[in-house]
Amino acid sequence: GAGVSQSPSNKVTEKGKDVELRCDPISGHTALYWYRQSLGQGLEFLIYFQGNSAPDKSGLPSDRFSAERTGGSVSTLTIQRTQQEDSAVYLCASSLASAPVADTQYFGPGTRLTVL
Amino acid sequence: AQSVAQPEDQVNVAEGNPLTVKCTYSVSGNPYLFWYVQYPNRGLQFLLKYITGDNLVKGSYGFEAEFNKSQTSFHLKKPSALVSDSALYFCAVRAPSGSARQLTFGSGTQLTVLP
C-alpha cells in the first residue's frame, strides 16, 4: 500500500517568510509524528498527534513552529518568520499506535527546507 | 531522560565480510529499541525492533540485532555485507511506559561496504 507522503519535497524560502509543510500518513494510522533532521542537531522530535488527544508539542523549538492535523489524517507543519537555522529536512512518520507495546513508525521521504 | 549513543560515525567493511554497527542506550525501565536505515535523499526505512522476548531480533535484508541488557547495547549485525548496504544507520529508543511515544535517535553511523 501507499506509504507516508510529504510535500513539497524541496522548499526554498527567504528569511522571514512563512512556510507550510504537508504530511499524508498511511491510511488507518492514528498516530502521526514530525521530526527534524539537521547537520548540527541530528534527528529531533518536534510534535506528536494521537487520535483526538491533545498533541504532544514538547519538541517544538519555538513558538514560530505549529502543527495541526485535520480529520485525524493529513497534518500541516507551519513555520512562521523562518530563520536560517530552520534549514533542515523535516520528516513525518505515522504508526498504528494500536497497542501498549511499541508500534513501528514509518517515515515519509521528508521535505528539505532551505532558508536563504 | 532517554538517550542513544552510536560511538562510530563511520564504519567501513569489505563486501562479504560481517558487519557490526554499535548502539548503546540509556532509558528508565525496559527499552523499546529500533534500527532504521537512510539512503541518500530518502526518508528512514524500518529495519527491526526489540520489544521483549528473544534477545536476537531478525529484520529486513538479512540484518539482525542483539539486545544485551547488562551492557545496555543493541548492536546491528549482518553476516555478509553487500555494497548495497552502504547507507546511514540510526539506532533509536522509546521509553516503555507513559504517553511519550516519540523516538530518541542516535547520531547515526555511515556504513560503507567496499567492493
Image (tube, helix red, strand yellow):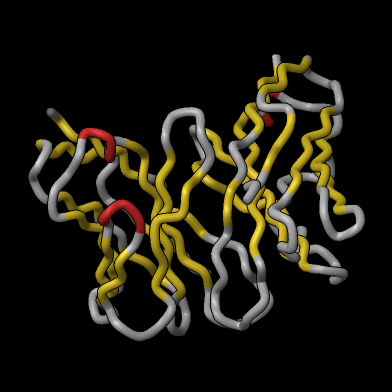
Residue sitting at 74 percent across and 26 percent down? A83
**Residue A7 location in percent, x, y?**
73, 32
| Looking at the image, residue A99 lies above or below residue B94 | below
Residue sitting at 29 percent across and 74 percent down? B67
Q: How many marks?
A: 0
| Looking at the image, residue A78 lies above or below residue A19 | below
In-front residue for pair B11/B5: B11
Residue A43 falls left or right of residue A93: left
Q: Quadrant of residue B109?
A: top left
Residue B37 falls left or right of residue A79: left
Quadrant including the C terminus of chain B: top left
**Residue B47 location in percent, x, y?**
40, 56
**Residue B26 location in percent, x, y?**
40, 70
Residue sitting at 27 percent across and 51 percent down? B7
In-front residue for pair B64/A53: B64
Say if residue A48 shows up in the picture.
Answer: no
In-front residue for pair B18/B22: B18
**Residue B98 location in percent, x, y?**
64, 81
